[in-house]
Amino acid sequence: MDDHRLNSPYVVKAIGDPVKLESGLMQKESGYMDKIIKAMDKTATVERSNNIVIPKYDGKMTIKYIEMEEQG
């Protein structure tokens, strides 16, 4: 991210099964909300939506860690 800091609030959007995505975040002691957010004494909310729009990335993309496999 070119050492740019992000200011809160953070919004994370994900496309997938909303029940599975939410349960992965909310698991007691092993989910992100318990393990990371609460441990840092922060608060967060999870919101389900059936109409998520994730705009295409319009910035520069740099590939750093790729190796070409030799065909033979």
Image: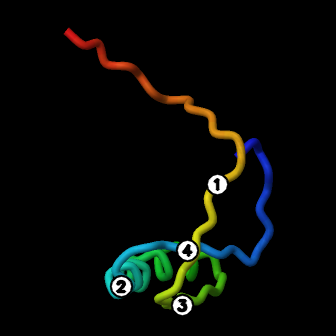
Which is nearer the N-term, disc 3 or disc 1?
3
Categorize mark 2 by other alpha carbons within 10 Å: few (<14), some (14-19), many (20+).
few
Q: Tell me the distance, in whole angstroms, between the alpha carbons under discs 3 and 1.
A: 23 Å
- The residue to which callout 4 is attached is 13
Q: Is residue 51 left or right of residue 21?
A: right
CA–CA distance between discs 2 and 3?
12 Å
Residue 57 has which mark? 1
Tell me, yes or no, if residue 28 can be seen here: no
Of mark 4 and mark 2, the one earlier in the sequence is 4
Q: Which residue is mark 3?
A: 47
Residue that mark 2 sits on: 23
Name the N-terminal-most of marks 2 and 3. Answer: 2
Residue type (three-letter) at the residue carrying disc 1: Tyr
- Answer with mark 4 or mark 1, whichever residue precedes in sequence: 4
**66 vs 61: above or below:** above
Depth-wise, is mark 4 or mark 1 nearer the camera?
Answer: 1
Q: Which amino acid lies under the numbered mark 3 shown in the image of this protein? A: Glu
Dividing the picture into quadrants, the one containing residue 53 is bottom right
Q: Residue furthest left?
A: 72
The residue at 61%/59% (across/down) is 56
Residue drawn at x 58%, y 69% as measured from the top left: 54
For label 4, the SS is loop
